Image (tube, rainbow, N blue to C red):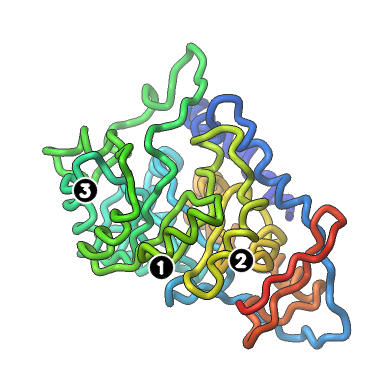
Amino acid sequence: MSEWVRSLEERAGDVLPEPVYRYFRQGARDGVTAGEAAAAWDRFRLLPHVLRDVTDVDTSSSVLGTPLRTPLAVAPTTLQRAAHPDGEVAMARAVAEAGSLLVVSSNAGSTFEAIGGTGAPWWLQAYLTPDRDACRPIVELAVAAGARAVVLTVDTPVVGTKYDGAGQTVWDAIDPAWLRVNFSDSHAATAGGDKATDLCLADIEWLGRITGLPVVVKGVLRRDDARRCVEAGAAAVWVSNHGGRQLDYAAATATCLFAVAEEVGPDAEVYADGGVRTARHALTAVALGARAAFLGRLPLYALAVEGAAGVANLFAELEDELVEMMRLAGVRELHPRGSDALDILVQNGGTAERRQGR
C-alpha cells in the first residue's frame, strides 16, 4: 500500500480524542480476531497469468445491480460524526465521487434524507429488536429516503464486551447528537439499544416484505448458515465477523470466504469485510468468490484525517493500486464472462483455490 494509506491509522490517532480513537480501533475482549484480520488476507499468494493483453483492465463490479467502479465499498460504522462534523454526509459525498456504495448504520448521526441527498447509492444496516414492530419506523424512513437494500446484521444478539479500562470511555466523550438521529423520541432508547436474541430465518422474509427491498445478511462465517440464509430469501450473504468486535477468537473472514462462496454459488451474491486494507486484499476477495470487499475502519480514519477529500483520495489510491495489481497478475476483468474462475490464488503454498461457474 502507499505510504499515505499506511499512515492513515496513525494520523487519525493524532487528530481524534483518545476515547474515540480507541473505540474505532478496539476489538472484543482480547482483540485476537480484530488483530489477525489483515494478516489472514496477507497469507494468500498470487499465481499470475502471463502473455495476456492487459493494456486495458476492467476494475468494475456491481452489487445487487448497483455498479461499482472498483469492488470496494464502505461498511456500516457508527459515530462517523465523531470522526468529522459532517459524518455520514461527508462519507457519502466521497463515495459518490468514487463511484462506490455506502452502507449506513441504523445508529447514524446524520439523517437518511441528507445522506440520500448526496446522490450516493446507499443501503441501510439494521439491527432487529425484541419487538420487531419497533424497527418499522426507521426502516420505513430509510426506504422513503432512497435506501436500495437492507443489511440485516445477525452476529449481534448481544454486544460483545470491550475492555476500556478505568478511564474515560467514548460514551463519555461524544455528543449524543452524533448518534441515532433517525430514531423517533418514543423508541430511541429501546430500539437503539436492545438487540433481538431470537433472530430467525423468518426475519429475512419479514424485512424483505415490509421494505420491498433486497435483504443482505451480514455476519455469516459458515457455509451451512449461508445456505440457510439463501433458502430463506436473502439476496446476498456478507461474510463478516463484525470487525472482530463481537465474538473474539472467531475465524478470520478471509479464511471463511471461499467455503461460503462455493456453497452459495450463483444463488446469491457474496461480500466480505474484515481487515481489508489494500487493493490486493480486494483482488483476493474477488478471486475467492466475493462481488465486493467492504472497508470499515480505513474510511473512518481517512474521514478523520482529511474529511470527504480524504475518503475520496483513499478510493483513488486503492483504484490505482488495483489497476497495477490486475496488470501484473494478468487479470483483465474481475468477473470473467462464462464459466472461467479468477484462478490466481495459492494459499499458504498449497494448491490453487479455484471456483467454477461464477
- How far separated are the C-alphas under marks 1 and 3? 20 Å
The residue tagged 2 is 262
Local secondary structure at mark 1: loop
The quarter of the picture where residue 313 lies is: bottom right
Instruction: Mark 2: give few (<14), some (14-19) or many (20+) Cα within 10 Å.
Output: some
Residue at the spot 23% in from the left edge and 55% down from the top edge: 139
Side (left or right) of 264 relative to 119: right
What x and y, as percent, mark residue 332?
72, 82
What x and y, as percent, mark residue 26?
55, 31
Query: Mark 2 or mark 1, which has the lower sequence index?
Result: 1
Specify whether residue 310 is in view: no
Asked if disc 2 and disc 1 are in contact, CB closer than 8 Å, the reply is: no
Residue at the spot 26% in from the left edge and 41% down from the top edge: 129
Which is in the foreground here, disc 3 or disc 2?
Answer: 2
Say the numbered circle drawn on residue 357. Answer: none
Query: Mark 1 or mark 3, which has the lower sequence index?
Result: 3
Kind of residue sitting beneath label 2: Glu
Query: Mark 3 or mark 2, which has the lower sequence index?
Result: 3
Say the numbered circle drawn on residue 235. Answer: 1
The residue tagged 3 is 135
Local secondary structure at mark 3: helix
Side (left or right) of 331 relative to 114: right
Kind of residue sitting beneath label 1: Ala
In the picture, the quarter occupied by the C terminus is bottom right
In the displayed orientation, state which residue is furthest to the left. 186
